[in-house]
Image: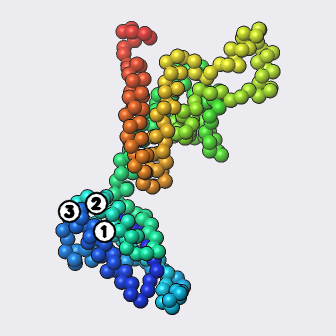
């Protein structure tokens, strides 16, 4: 089922239902579908109509702007349903001059977005698991709800997540970052004058001060390499995630980039987790 709004110029000779049925018949046949004329009539249902003002053209012909809302219901057995839908939309615009068409509810898009949403959910949860593993290790004696205390990136919400909220939801600060923020982790904010003066006072010598100023939140070499590797893969995932979040169809380029990046990110996460496969204490490093 697909919902449309069509804006067009209606004249005394415009038979809008006939035009819709003729265009649909043509694209259905072009995609190996054979339906009777009665079946095709039932596929198009008019829902709304808003009439605009009447105008007179230079040749004294009258026309009226009309906004028509209609539903297109394609049977389950329709062959090449996506192609049929795309060609129907384009053919309708080509057939009706000075028209504009917008598609809203779209069963095929819902199915695609649901699949992509499931994939992205799995990826992001695994990413949060890896990040938590990294930061728990780096901040073993710190507040587990303040893992980003040394990070430039912070939750963007106006009302920052509080400890009680995160404890109740059984999550942490990583659940409140956006995709674009993950790639900037392990970057400290520029030091404030007060913090800089405090570091100078607490440092025994220049080398100690230099190390503190240049210290990264995460210093383990493998963890640093993992965080750096996110930058190459997250952009394409984020673009697809934005389409899913805002219920719009991604372009072919976005889909292709996502399909290429998703297995790379999955492998990066799986390889990292495989390093820390559970073993009985005493069998290896404790």
The residue carrying mark 3 is 32
Residue 18 locus on image (x, y percent): 31, 80
250 and 171: which is toward the camera: 250
Residue 5 locus on image (x, y percent): 44, 71
Task: Say which of marks 1 and 2 sits in front.
Answer: 2
* Secondary structure found at label 2: helix
Q: In the rendered image of this protein, does residue 259 appear above or below residue 14?
A: above
Query: In the rendered structure, which disc, 3 or 2, sits on the residue that comes first in sequence?
Result: 3
Residue 189 locus on image (x, y percent): 68, 29
Graded by Cα atoms within 10 Å as few (under 14), some (14 to 19) or many (20 or more), the crowding at tag 3 reads few
* Secondary structure found at label 3: loop
Residue lying at 81% horizontally and 21% vertically, measured from the top left: 197
Taking the image as shown, residue 91 lies to the left or right of residue 52, namely: left
- Number of dots carrying numbers: 3
Query: In the rendered structure, which disc, 1 or 2, sits on the residue that comes first in sequence?
Result: 1
* Secondary structure found at label 1: loop
Of the 4 image quadrants, the one containing the N terminus is bottom left
192 and 12: which is toward the camera: 12
In space, the residues marked 1 and 2 are separated at their CA atoms by: 11 Å
Q: In the rendered image of this protein, does residue 132 appear above or below residue 44?
A: above
Q: Which mark is residue 73?
A: 1
Mark 1 vs 2: CB contact within 8 A: no
Q: In the rendered image of this protein, does residue 72 appear above or below residue 205?
A: below
Residue lying at 49% horizontally and 81% vertically, measured from the top left: 65
The residue carrying mark 2 is 81
Farthest-out residue, bottom? 60
Farthest-out residue, front? 59
């Amino acid at each position: 089922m697909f919902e449309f709004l069509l804006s067009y110029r209606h004249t005394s000779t415009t038979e809008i239902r006939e035009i819709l049925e003729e265009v649909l018949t043509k694209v259905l046949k072009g995609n190996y579908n054979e339906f009777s004329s009665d079946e095709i009539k039932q596929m198009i249902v008019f829902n709304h109509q808003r009439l605009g003002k009447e105008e007179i053209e230079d040749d004294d012909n009258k026309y009226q702007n009309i906004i028509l809302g209609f539903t297109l219901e394609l049977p389950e057995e329709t062959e090449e349903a996506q192609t049929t839908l795309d060609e129907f939309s384009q053919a309708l615009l080509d057939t009706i001059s000075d028209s504009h068409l917008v598609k809203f509810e779209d069963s095929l898009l819902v199915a695609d977005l649901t699949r992509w949403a499931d994939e992205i959910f799995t990826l992001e949860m695994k990413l949060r698991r890896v990040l938590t593993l990294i930061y728990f290790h780096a901040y073993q004696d710190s507040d587990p709800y303040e893992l980003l205390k040394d990070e430039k990136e912070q939750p963007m919400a106006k009302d920052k997540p509080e400890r009680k909220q995160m404890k109740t939801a059984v999550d942490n600060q990583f659940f409140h970052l956006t995709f674009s923020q993950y790639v900037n982790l392990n970057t400290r904010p520029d030091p404030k004058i007060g913090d800089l003066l405090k570091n100078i006072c607490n440092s025994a010598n220049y080398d100690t001060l230099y190390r503190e100023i240049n210290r990264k939140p995460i210093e383990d070499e493998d963890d640093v390499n993992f965080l750096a590797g996110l930058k190459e893969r997250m952009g394409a995932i984020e673009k697809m995630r934005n389409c899913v979040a805002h219920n719009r169809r991604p372009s072919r380029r976005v889909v292709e980039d996502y399909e290429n990046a998703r297995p790379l990110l999955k492998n990066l996460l799986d390889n990292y987790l495989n390093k820390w496969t559970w073993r009985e204490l005493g069998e290896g490093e404790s």
